[in-house]
Image (spheres, rainbow, N blue to C red):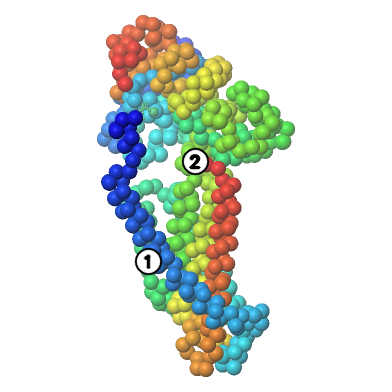
Amino acid sequence: MTEDTMSLFEETALNAKNKRVQGLYRTLFMLMTLLLITPVVIILATLVVKGSAVLSIDFLFTDPTDGMTAGGIFPALLGTVWLVTVALLVSVPLGVAAAIYLSEYAPDNWFTRLINLAIINLAGVPSIVHALFGVGAFVIFFGFGTSILAASLTLAIMTLPVVIVATRESLQAVPQAFREACWNMGATRWQTIRKVVLPNSISGILTGVILEVSRTTGETAPVMFTGAAFFLPFLPQSVFDQTMAMSLHLFVVSTQVPHVPEALPYGVALVLIGMVLIMNSISIAFRMYLRGKKKW
Amino acid sequence: MMNNAAQIAETTEQAQQYAIRTEKLNLWYGTFQALYDVDFNIRQGMITSLIGPSGCGKSTYLRSVNRINERLGYVRIEGNIDVFGQNIYDPSVELVQVRKQIGMVFQRPNPLPISIRDNILFGHKLHSGGRASRSEQDGIVEDALRQVLLWDKVKDRLNRKATELSLEEQQKLCIARLLPVKPRVLLMDEPCSALDPKGTAAVEELIWELRGKYSILIVTHNMAQARRASEECIFMLMGKVVEHATTDQLFVSPQSQQTADYIEGRYG
Ligand SMILES: Nc1ncnc2c1ncn2[C@@H]1O[C@H](COP(=O)(O)OP(=O)(O)OP(=O)(O)O)[C@@H](O)[C@H]1O
Ligand SMILES: [Mg+2]
């Protein structure tokens, strides 16, 4: 064996240096990741440790008592379900229809591009601005007063851009070749959408939309001015009533009411996060299930 | 001198002889002219192949015949394409009917992500309003699959997803699903270029089988394929038609030097 062939597979100085550098970056990125998830873990752990004491079935299903320093959170829980449901009922059909138009029908011209730009920017509008818009438009101008309807519409307007973007992404994930196949057999645009595009994107649309909308569960500002009350002695009977809401309730018991037992706000926060996490998990599980079934 | 009636009789006779008549077709993508005075007639019930170097406008021509080009806002078209005697660019023409009469097969097989059976019935359902009994549908599926020589292979798995088939089978299926709507013209844009040699041979054989029942215009880069699988051949170069002859004649004694150079492989 010659000298040459022996050294063929030996580590050189350069190899060693590159390896050290690569190891360094790997560690660096790993530390960043750990750093990133630390606050999440701490928040969740604190909530569980401090809040689980108050958690019980009764806590979920009874009214607050003693000036909100005791009792449960039922009106707030129910209120949030109302608010999110009505918001969904408005924003999903509207947003999905708009996304279908933009992705499947609209010609690619400056006007469409302007609309797309507007939608992206709308998604970045702070929620307090939406809240004030909601007061002006729904509470005062349309005369809904402070009510579930006004608050839900405000939430709906706020989520529309993300619903549109999520839907459009799902639609655009459907290969163009499928559309061409349909058009070339003489299908109209609508037949193509109805028979091929929607069936192949509806799962993505739904999960994307649930994921986005679940975020509104925790929104405080938009509902505080438009339909959510600090405390109500009765449950809402229709969408024209005011309601309590989880997010606002959390704000109230942690900052506005004296002599609240320490565990109570943590318990409320835990339930609120739990609601969001459950919705997210359902949507992610659903998405994974459907992705497994898809093949292209 | 012929009298009018005889003249009309003669023109209709001619029109019936040709599936596609193209007159002075010019096409621009924006300011770029892709077709120059394209002028040729495609005979009914025959296989005509369209050959020429990359970028000479073969696909552009094909896409003008079933009017997909116009989807692009910047395309301008002048001239006429008559299909069975009717100008398909006439304002009174219904686009859906054009697409129905003129089927198109793409380079990459594009079956829909539904079952084999539903792929075959897709076009039929579109155009019949979906009113067909189960047994009628079975008949349509079997007939279409038999025509593309696929029936024996897939008859036991009609409800499986079409996307699970091999590329060759997918391409045959893409041809099969055009047939239930009874198109008169089939356009194929390099239908074999995504297939291996065996698949190519199989699809060629199938195209040959369809001769006579449909008027077929096939674009190909494969000289041998044009020679084997077509009866007439058109050679295009830089957006112009250079030569149009029977395949034998074009390959054995090309009239134009450019054609001769191309078939001997002197262009890309
Ligand atoms: N959508 C388009 N927009 C602008 N120019 C285009 C478009 N499609 C094709 N062209 C141009 O038109 C010319 C003809 O293209 P075409 O696709 O018809 O060629 P082809 O003969 O089919 O080539 P190939 O053998 O590579 O498929 C080319 O120069 C091409 O760049
Ligand atoms: Mg081409």
Q: Position of residue A152 (x, y in %)?
A: 51, 72
Identify which amino acid the numbered label 2 is placed on.
Arg
Identify residue for label 2: A179
Q: At 44% across and 57% down in the image, what residue appears?
A: A165
Residue B144, picture quadrant:
top right
At label 2, counting other C-alpha atoms closer than 10 Å, the crowd grade (few under 14, some 14-19, many 20 or more) is some
Residue B219 screen position, x and y as percent? 43, 23
Q: Does dot 2 land on a helix, a strand or a loop?
A: helix
User: Which circle's residue, 1 or 2, is located before the other in the chain?
Assistant: 1
Residue drawn at (46%, 66%), measured in percent from left and top?
A: A159
Q: Nearer the viewer, residue B9 or A212?
A: A212
User: From the viewer's perspective, is A111 left or right of B115?
Assistant: left
* Residue B227 x, y percent position in the rendering: 44, 13
Q: Secondary structure at mark 1?
A: loop
Question: Dot 1: within a 10 Å radius of its alpha carbon, few (fewer than 14), some, or many (20 or more) residues?
Answer: few
B98 and B117: which one is in front? B117
Q: Nearer the viewer, mark 1 or mark 2?
A: 1
Tell me: residue B219, above or below residue A35.
above
Task: Give me the chain letter of mark 2.
Answer: A
Quadrant (top left, top right, bottom left, bottom right) of the N terminus of chain A: top left
How far is the residue under mark 1 from the one under mark 2? 32 Å
Amino acid of disc 1:
Gly
User: Which residue bears the numbered disc 1?
Assistant: A124
- What's the chain of the residue with tag 1? A
Q: Which residue sits at x=48%, y=83%?
A: A251
Q: Nearer the viewer, residue A214 or B58?
A: A214
Horizontal placement of A240 versus A159: left or right? right
User: What is the x, y in percent for residue B18?
Assistant: 47, 17
